[in-house]
Image (spheres, rainbow, N blue to C red):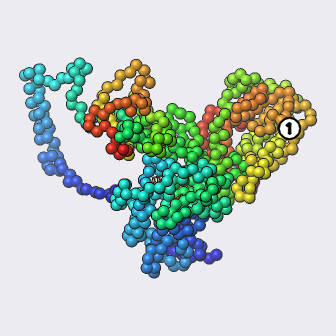
Amino acid sequence: MNKKIKTIQRHGKTFKDRIYIPAIIEGLKTTIKHLAHNVSDINSVDVLEYPEEQPTDITERYRGLHRLTHREDGTISCVACFMCATACPSACIFIEATQREDGVDEKMPQKFSIDTLECIFCGYCVEACPCDAIRMDTGIFSLIGREREDFLLDKEKLLSFKGAFAQEDSIARK
Amino acid sequence: MSLVTVNIDDKSYEAKENSLLIDLLILHDIKVPYFCYHESLGADGNCRMCMVEIEGKKRPQIACDTFVSDGMSIQTASEKISSVRKRILELELINHPVDCPICDQAGECKLQDYYMDFGLYDSNIDMKEKVHNKKHIALGSSVILDRERCVLCTRCVRFTSNITKSGELGVINRGDKACISTVPGMKLDNPYAMNVVDLCPVGALTSKEFRFAQRVWFLKSTPSICHGCSTGCNIFIDHNQEKYKEDKIYRIRPRKNREVNGDFICDYGRLSYKNLQENRQQELLNKSNVISYEDALLELNSKISGSKNIVILVDANLYNEDIAAISNFSQKIGAKLVCPTECYFDDSFGDDWLKSDYKCANLQAIKNYKIDSLFSSDQQIDLLINFNHPSFSKFSSKQSVEFSTHKGSSAELVLAIPAYSEYSGTTINDANIEQYSQKAITTDVATISEYLSDLSKVAL
Ligand code: SF4
Ligand code: SF4
Ligand code: SF4
Ligand code: SF4
Ligand code: FES
């Protein structure tokens, strides 16, 4: 982990850039072009008739609902290190650690829950995890419940979600 | 002893002649990594982390085995030293499992700190090539050994051989097979055993009591004084209030004080936090019914004014401030103030090091206030007011009031009070040193001084 520093050339220092007006005119041109196009043919405006129509553009980088990944043997990969809970700006990850008895690892969460009402879906937990144990690749973007408790996702629930993309198991704890 | 001047990184410092160079570096917060040296255990010179450059010496020297001399000139951060340190650290870490996610030491680990301060190299060894060793070995006394994480600094071995002289630990085998072990057939078993957990600079020795309970960076450390016995060891109370939960103590650690306990505490004191959180009295009770604070004071007041022969029992663990307030109060109501001390005495507990025969923290204050310590009553007591003294049940009285930290009181009127960790005050230890304990945990239970001052308002 050497500190590598790269110096980036700054742009936007010319006279044309600094008086702004050419850039504003450039931007307005695009806006007016779209306006003219939409007014001439109202049916060409992009509309998604949600919820009857579902989005089709959810990519791998989309931060959907969290899930806890598994190891290759199907057991939980989380080791209850609290890195995610430490990184979480909303302090909405609740973990209780315990000794793991099956010989796969030494430690695991007894309880692990995320309060999705407090969560801001920033993805810091995913970045912080050293075990690739928490991901937001479920593609689930809406969660419905009747009570506040329905939004508190526990360990079993988080483990039950499947990834929406190719990588299913943890790549760090196998 | 005369003073000498030493030049370190182009600044001059004064030190006692023939003192250790590493002590001088530590004293002035000059960054130097070290595993095996410890102020209370002395130098061993096995880890080689504390290298410095000394002018006139061809090779880098270890600071823990170098005595200062006048005019010495030292470099602690030269390029040569930095590269030597980096390579030694790399060697220490060569078979290290880098278990940080599951290691209780993470956050207060010297390997982590030194890697960030002096290492920052890319590892040259593949995780798969690392030599594995036994993990999770119970040594006894709630200490767990992880041989993979050990850096063989022998601090733990030297603690059991030089300090407790019980000699349970040793290094067995040689070379890369060398590891820490208990003597065959022996368990780690002495009243100070758990100090090895604090001594171990890495996560090789961890405590079963603290295992996986908290990550250390969440803990708040409050300086306090152990109330286990009258030595008054200086401690840190490590606690944390998790979101939506109560503030809780997770461990007690020794706090350095050369005059009292040095770097250590006994295991009894270390584990005494459990009793501080179990079976606690929270409510105010009148004949087992929960009552309000105001009603409790009125009840207490009417009991006092209706009684003639009043005896007040005071616990020898209370802070000076409480004892002063109780002593004033007893004079005001004309009560007899007593503290039988026999119940604190336990000569099987005391030893010739830290543990003392009296298992109470403020015996000296009882003596200073000249409180009767031998009391036994043949007279009929009208009202007995107990301030958390353990032998309350030995006395009979017509009416009784108890200020109690723990449940199980048989008094008619029971008033909850905070334990020592829940408010601040001073105690005097058996060497007559007055020491201050800070409040670690917040509760809404009233303190003794609050009760007594509010009572005087009711009585008006
Ligand atoms: S996405 Fe952000 S706010 Fe939500 S749990 Fe993860 S770290 Fe916390
Ligand atoms: S999800 Fe990852 S970061 Fe969070 S506790 Fe588990 S292993 Fe650690
Ligand atoms: S001893 Fe230190 S470096 Fe090793 S696993 Fe534990 S925290 Fe990490
Ligand atoms: S167990 Fe800890 S204290 Fe003992 S030799 Fe190993 S690293 Fe040092
Ligand atoms: S501290 Fe000097 S050699 Fe270990």
Image vertical order of residue B336 relative to residue B264, above or below: above
Residue reaching furthest to the front: B185
Image position, residue A100 (x, y; %): 48, 41
Residue in view at x 28 percent, y 57 percent: A5
Q: Nearer the viewer, residue A154 or B170?
A: B170
Q: Residues within 10 Å of mark 1 (few under 14, many from 20)?
A: some
- Quadrant holding the C terminus of chain B: top right
Image position, residue B84 (x, y; %): 41, 69
Residue in view at x 11 percent, y 27 percent: A35
Q: Nearer the viewer, residue A13 or A106?
A: A106
Count of marks overlaid on the render = 1
- The answer to which image quadrant residue B44 occupies is bottom right
Mark 1 lies on a secondary structure that is strand
Residue in view at x 42 percent, y 28 percent: A152
Which residue is under mark 1? B336
Image vertical order of residue B182 relative to residue B212, above or below: below
Using residue B452 as the reference point, say whether residue B136 is left or right of it.
left
Image position, residue A47 (x, y; %): 18, 23
Residue reaching furthest to the left: A40
What chain does badge 1 belong to? B
- The answer to which image quadrant residue A115 occupies is top left
Residue B421 appears in the figure: yes
- Quadrant holding the N terminus of chain B: bottom right
Image vertical order of residue B163 relative to residue B67, above or below: above
Residue reaching furthest to the right: B378
Residue in view at x 44 percent, y 51 percent: B99
Residue B118 appears in the figure: no
**Residue type of the residue flagged with mark 1:** Lys
